[in-house]
Amino acid sequence: MLGQLRLRAAIGSSLTFALILVAASAGASSDPDERWLWDTSQKDSFGIIFQESSELIAQPLTLNGEEAGASGGVGFHKCLSVLDPKCKDVIKYIYFFYLPQCESPSSINCIEGFWAIDKSGKRIEGVRYGQVPTTPAIPYTNVGAPSLPTGSVPQLYRLPGLNHGGGSDLYSINAQVKGGDRGKDANGVWQFGREGIFEAGIYPVTIKEGAYGDTGLFNNALDNRSCAHAGDGKCSMRESFPSDARFGLKVRLGWRANGWIHGRINEPVATFDVSASGSNQVSVVSLEAKPVKVPTFSVTMPKTDLPAELRRLYLEGGSKDDPRIWGRGGISTTLGRSLSGDVINSITYEPNVANGIDELAIWLALGKEKAVAAPTYWSFKLRSAWDQCTTTNSKLSAVLGTNATTYLDGPPVFNAETQTLDYRVSAPHSMPDGIKTVGTYDLVIDASVARCIYGFSNAPVSASISVVGENGENRVAATTVRERDGWIYLSASGFTFSSPTLRVKLSQETVAASKPTEVAKKSIVCTKMSKVAAGKKLMTKRVTAENPKCPKGFKKR
């Protein structure tokens, strides 16, 4: 499915890993950590930062067209449709849109419901309030390409009575779909698949007015990096979450999304249903969970103070057009200034490779193992199936959540030696206030998928979870394991960092095949008088059986 898309997009709960020749400092002390920004004003310094991806709040509704330049370069256009004159030479399309509210029971690619459970256990239903921006700057249509999916911008909802840190009950639902074309058909019409890459986030917001340009279009007079979205002179300013509340989101997607969910969530409960819409499938995904605090880590120092090993890794051997930092495992790079001090280089990581975790390990000691901010997130991404066990599963296979700064967004790795599912996470040892960073990890896995991975029978499965430190030692953690309604729930909390491995062990008792019980047999002697030439003769016969009986004509002696 997704592999058929002509698209290379960042999948997963992406970690932003930026290296720049600047200084880093926190924002205004009165602002919540959700609005913490890296100060890039100081020169002649080298900095590194690990923080959550901003793609959900920085990507506008858009149809991007890629055009091959005459010199071999690539140009990009923001197209109003595939018939847009400026996009006539486009060779590939990538689209981004956000889910609007469902208008009818038959609507697809839409938000069916949003709710919260407050600390008293009361359920509060979300009420749609509007959207920001009211009018998208570059909306696209599917004119000329009927199969091109379309959508909207992030939606605003009220949760009456559930006020967040900004004193409002307003929340932005950024539920994003991204995908690409499948080329042109025989008639020259661009074709697009129904399936896409889906991710969603909930952001407590207050509405601020001013000279805010559109998110991602660089037409703003006011800094909109702290906005969940912006445009039309409005900013959905991010605020902190209310405490002790759970949040839920239910969406309808226009394809069979039978993979798994991972993200910034705690104690998740998910449901998944597939129905038909004509000849097409529709997935209904529902997720309820607690938000989590995610440590942001940053180090900045004068270039002259950079340790020799790090200078060798990041500065030496590079050039303006080919800086060494590009090879440190990132999947995309933004070049703004040169290594001499005139440019900013940034690398965005997908956490499904180990580089993000390994890079963080290099810098933790220099940053005194302390986070610079700890914003709270409620977000998740939907990944496609990853192996035969999940591909053949017709429903959601697993849900995974953690608050670690870096983590692998792929499925847990099966360790054949220990017969465990291993999952690496990493974060600084302490939070900005100096308190130890306390980790959370949740894995909810379909019991049939677990049985498939391990080759188990349908007999009950037992499980355990442990936290193993970098040196192989067991970390203290509170763990819970249970199986309910066809799901195995595993969670670990209270463990500390820097880079532990979460190890899930599933097992099943082998029941020896019972041997049939041998029944004692009895023997009897049967007799019969038989005529012979000389007269009569007594004939005898021994019969052995569970319930022996004499043959016809014989009598038991």
Image (cartoon, helix red, strand yellow):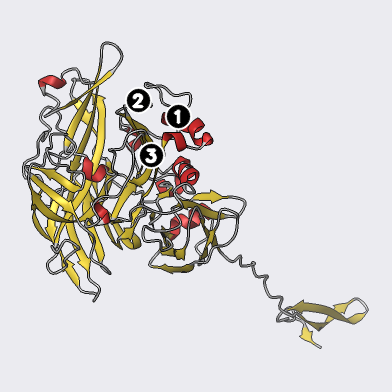
Q: Amino acid at mark 3?
A: Gly
Q: Secondary structure at mark 3?
A: strand
Q: Quadrant of the C terminus?
A: bottom right
Considering every residue shown, the one lying at the far right of the view is 534
Residue 315: mark in rendering: 1
Up/down of 545 relative to 179, above or below: below
Residue 127 in picture, x, y percent from top left: 10, 61
Is residue 451 in sight in this rendering?
Answer: yes
Comes first in the chain, label 3 or label 1: 3
Horizontal side of residue 67 vs 82, given as left or right: right
Residue 404 in picture, x, y percent from top left: 41, 54
**Depth check, front residue: 306 or 349:** 306
Q: CA distance from mark 2 to mark 1?
A: 11 Å
Q: Secondary structure at mark 2?
A: loop
Q: CA distance from mark 3 to mark 1?
A: 12 Å
Horizontal side of residue 523 vs 314, given as left or right: right
Residue 47: mark in rendering: 3
**Residue 90 appears in which quarter of the rendering?**
top left
Considering every residue shown, the one lying at the far top of the view is 70
Residue 535 in picture, x, y percent from top left: 90, 81
Question: Which residue lies under the disc numbered 2?
Answer: 338
Q: Residues within 10 Å of mark 1 (few under 14, many from 20)?
A: some
Is residue 105 in sight in this rendering?
Answer: no
Q: Amino acid at mark 1?
A: Leu
Comes first in the chain, label 2 or label 1: 1
Residue at the image point whose x is 25% and y is 73% from the top: 119
Q: Are marks 3 and 2 in contact (CB under 8 Å)?
A: no
